[in-house]
Image (spheres, rainbow, N blue to C red):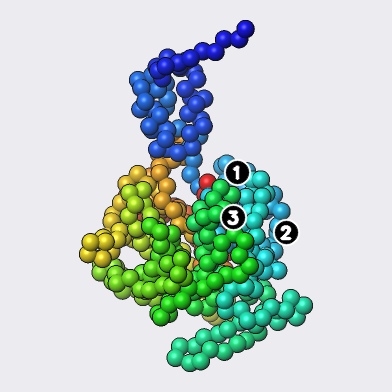
Amino acid sequence: MSQVMMFDLWEELPSDLLPEIAKHLHSSKDYVRFRATCKTCYLNLSNIPNHITGPKLMIPFDFGMGRVENFVHLRLPEKPNRTLYRGSGFGWLIGIGIDGVIRMLDPVTNDHIDLPPMSTTPDIVEFHPDNEDEEYTITGHVRNKPSYTYVIEKDHIQKMHLHKIIMSSSPKNHNHDFMALAIYGEQRQLALCRIGDSKWTTFSTKQSYFLQDVIFYEGKIYGIDIVAKLFEFDPKTLTGSIVQVPPPKDDDPRIRFLDVTTKYLIRNVEGDLLLVVRRWEWKKWRENGGVDEKYYNTTKFNVYKLDKSVKQWKRVSSVGNSVLVVGFNTSICMLPFSDGKNNWVRNCIYFSDNHVEAQYRQVYGGHDVGIFNLQNNTIQQFFPDRVFLCPPPLWLLS
């Protein structure tokens, strides 16, 4: 007859069993709580768990792997160079095929879920896949003039039409609640879909906007545009409006120019809404036929917290123990994690290159990836000797 050992107190557990239990905790907050359960746990568990790691950077398979300390080969089902990834979150990737298929993919299991195709975004009028180099008819806009239509090839649509796709949750575990948001078109408008929808549906609003990021927050959707206007969208009524919050007062006046900043919205661990402003500058790369060719690199980040009581953005110099992750991924705030060398990673911003317009030219872009340290305002560039990397790396978030 087998015997089952019962333990009424954590202190009674064999000390060598505690680390095995801790390995199944993949949140630093859960690990800290478990270590604080009792004196036995505290003494037998290390202060910094090496098994809790941060976001994974997905880079091209044929890139110089000698530069990377730890890597895992993932062979994705999509053919190389025929899929561009414009979103990631909750362990899933969102790719856009050259054929216009938009697919969510679990890169570990290769499970996938299709979203409505590119041809169903609201400003695409017609799609004729057999018309080579003239597959799409799209609606164009010029300020203060009537809209018009023009014909364009599928390569341009794949690379330029969708700027970013954001997920509300894991599509596998919350199918009934899941929503995806797409920032689309030359005016960077917002569209929504749910699993099973046959097309993307746009939000109606009286104001024009040029969104750079959106976030699901407190039952609504918030977006930020190029001049730091804050928008609120209702997923139930599919309407949107401007929130009367002025741009940060102490910000650089260049915030109003598209070519020097990118903005992101993030919910921090305390539940506040953060505005992250990424600054970058153009640098000389080489001279070509008497013309200076330039590329860009991120130079710094500013972080602001929304004070709801006065409806103002207030500058914050630190995010404490948190780590912010921005790029093509769903913008996120993470708890501290291990760097694998018994150090906590905290108070920094992990960034990847989501400059869609630059990447389209296939001359520079995709290279601007690294970590910004908020404590000393320094940047660690991952690819300092690169000006072009295709496909662009992006963060895979569990």
Outermost residue on the bottom side: it is: 145
Rate crowding at label 3 as few (under 14), some (14 to 19) or many (20 or more) other CA atoms within 10 Å: many
The picture places residue 55, in percent across and down from the top left corner, at 50, 47
Identified at 56% across, 42% down, the residue is 69
173 displayed left or right of 240: right
Q: Secondary structure at mark 1?
A: loop
Q: In the rendered image, which quarter is residue 264 located in? A: bottom left
Identified at 42% across, 68% down, the residue is 233
Residue under circle 2? 79
Residue under circle 3? 93
Report the Cα–Cα distance between label 2 and label 1.
21 Å
Outermost residue on the top side: it is: 1
Residue under circle 1? 71
Front tag of 2 and 3: 3
First-in-chain label (3 vs 1)? 1
Report the Cα–Cα distance between label 2 and label 3.
15 Å
Tell whether label 1 touches label 2 (CB within 8 Å). Answer: no
The picture places residue 330, in percent across and down from the top left corner, at 49, 57
Name the quadrant of the N terminus: top right
The picture places residue 298, in percent across and down from the top left corner, at 43, 62
Report the Cα–Cα distance between label 3 and label 1.
18 Å
Front tag of 2 and 1: 2
164 displayed left or right of 226: right
Front tag of 3 and 1: 3
